[in-house]
Image (cartoon, helix red, strand yellow):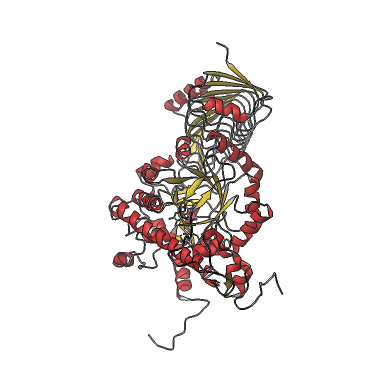
Amino acid sequence: MNEGLRESATFDRATIHAIQRAAATGVYDIRGWGAKRRLPHFDDLLFLGASMSRYPLEGYRERCDTDVVLGTRHARHPLHLDIPVTIAGMSFGALSANAKEALGRGATAAGTSTTTGDGGMTPEERGQSRHLVYQYLPSRYGMNPDDLRKADAIEIVLGQGAKPGGGGMLLGQKVTDRVAGMRTLPVGVDQRSACRHPDWTGPDDLTIKIVELREITDWEKPIYVKVGATRTYYDVKLAVHAGADVVVVDGMQGGTAATQEVFIEHVGIPTLAALPQAVQALQELGVHRKVQLIVSGGIRTGADVAKAIALGADAVAIGTAALIALGDNHPRYDAEYRALGSAAGFFDDFQDGRDPAGITTQDDELADRLDPEEGGRRLANYLRVLTMEAQTIARACGKAHLHHLEPEDLVALTIESAAMARVPLAGTDWIPGRTR
Amino acid sequence: MDPMTVDLAATPVRDLNQALHAPEPEQRWRVRNPRGAHAIACGLTRPLSVEIDGHVGYYCAGMNQHAAVTVNGNAGVGVAENMMSGTVRIRGNTSQSAGATAHGGLLVIEGDAAARCGISMKGVDIVVGGDVGHMSAFMGQAGRLVVCGDAGDALGDSLYEARLYVKGAVKSLGADCVEKPMRDEHLTELAGLLKAAEFDEDPAAFRRYGSARRLYHFKIDNAY
Ligand SMILES: Cc1cc2nc3c(=O)[nH]c(=O)nc-3n(C[C@H](O)[C@H](O)[C@H](O)COP(=O)(O)O)c2cc1C
């Protein structure tokens, strides 16, 4: 290539390709994964670590606890997890039964919970998950009171970070006999999941809906409310008023199985911007750490976990990273990814059902490539690493429990992240918008 | 034997529901003074009979399994939502989203039903003596909705495989919902539904509506 060629920052190669694709097909692009653009994120924060005035704990020797209890507000049986990293809701339909089973196995081995998704609960998943959260979605596909009672917690989904205000879709190639049967739909239709709940509108109705779910399950189970990050401060306040035990806030980086690219990249706010708003709402209501906060959207490392907790989350949830741990985007499938017009490290066609790693597919042959036990082991390993990394940081900050991390332990690298996270720009005492 | 009577003026709904969920509950129940309370008799799992004298609030008989629940009054939003089996009969009118997402059983509304009756229905049979409001059977996947009166705007919008029978006028049909011919099998099916609901209507006076199935596949023409 001629060294003098200059790529346009405005019309970069991906943009040019998108215009060409639109011109050729006349339909917008649908894909999986989350926002791919650069966003202010946890990478823009740093921990200060102990110093003259702070006393550290001995690395991997001194105790640094990691457990979390979710649902202490109203539920008779709150969830007690060993680690504050949970597996986010991903539907059977979007994922293969083997992938769901592997998530259950990995989560259980690491002492945490996993979550169903659109389309209902599979026996594979229930069987292998010690703590299983049952999603209650607008589509109510596969929604069944027997499964509701089998769940350890209930998550009412209002939205997802990847597509706040959007419903879901599952393209026909993934609507196999089993998926269609569970969802009461004709085999092979391009299936839409509703964007609005069918039997309530607005926060006052949600209050009554939560009471109904509690009545049906005899007030045993924690009830979560999941929102995509948008008007987070208000949404969290309304969720608390409606009676939620746990609020889940999913930032715009959050993964999805199938959404319009334009939606993924342009609707919602980053996880980093949403989290402090959620914490502020909880603090103003006097329920911070009483109504637990789970944050998701772009969690990859133990540093991300520690930063989210330091900013006030009680736990985090992971979707994309868990799939990668199972084998998604692995270089061993590079040739097959290329045959699909992608490459290892870039694959995001979760909607398409031809995933060489056997995770986002309903094709039996492809799904068989993922051994649920082996996948579960990899996920458990990864969850342990996240936890150990978070502990390493917490000990360096002198904390005997991950929950002792606090905003005071953090500084920001950029003005944007300082303003969003509400911590000072490194080397200054400046929090834009708060201090002068 | 007289039914077990619970007076909601004196007993919290929570206690009533707990008693109805007990491992070996009484077979027959009578509930007085519901006064619009929410979530009455929801989550039942056994073939009990529960009769409620008065108006109920939201989600009465929600997620019902096997029980027969009768309301001698009106019902609020989402009556019998996500019902799996059993029978729910409302002697008066219902608010919106009656029978929403219900998978099975029979819901009979002797009066009128407001908007979104049978929204996302997944196998339930709903028979309405009067009219239904707008967006009824929206995204209905399976089951049958019978309306002896009129239907409001956008009936059956984005319908999947639910079948709709309306005797009166339909204000407008929603996206992808069309009128379909009444064949013998439909007349027989409808006669059975009317009989089960104990309505004395002539099946021949009804028209049938269903999905044109043009929205089943995502393509340029419907990708908005
Ligand atoms: C394949 C896939 C399927 C998903 N399905 C659902 C779903 O059914 N319900 C839901 O609430 N969120 C769903 N999500 C979103 C996740 O629950 C979670 O919010 C998100 O993945 C978190 O962000 P992360 O992927 O950056 O960790 C899905 C995500 C992925 C990647």
| Residue at (56, 42) in percent of width and height | B174
Query: Does residue A63 show up?
Result: yes
Q: Residue B134: which quarter of the image?
A: top right
Compared with A18, A162 (above or below) is above
> What is the count of numbered marks?
0
Where does residue A265 sit, x and y in percent of width and height?
Answer: 53, 64
- Identify the image quadrant of the C terminus of chain A: bottom right
| Residue at (58, 59) in percent of width and height | A312
Where does residue A94 sit, x and y in percent of width and height?
Answer: 41, 52
Q: Nearer the viewer, residue A188 or B73?
A: B73
Left or right for A123, reference B87 = left
Where does residue A4 sit, x and y in percent of width and height?
Answer: 44, 89
Q: Residue A281: which quarter of the image?
A: bottom right
Left or right for A101, reference A210 = left
Where does residue A105 sit, x and y in percent of width and height?
Answer: 36, 50
| Residue at (56, 40) in percent of width and height | B173
Query: Does residue A185 show up?
Result: no
Compared with B93, A325 (above or below) is below
Compared with B221, A5 (above or below) is below
Left or right for B173, reference A359 = right
- Identify the image quadrant of the N terminus of chain A: bottom left
Q: Residue furthest top?
A: B1
Q: Nearer the viewer, residue A273 or B127?
A: A273
Compared with A227, A49 (above or below) is below
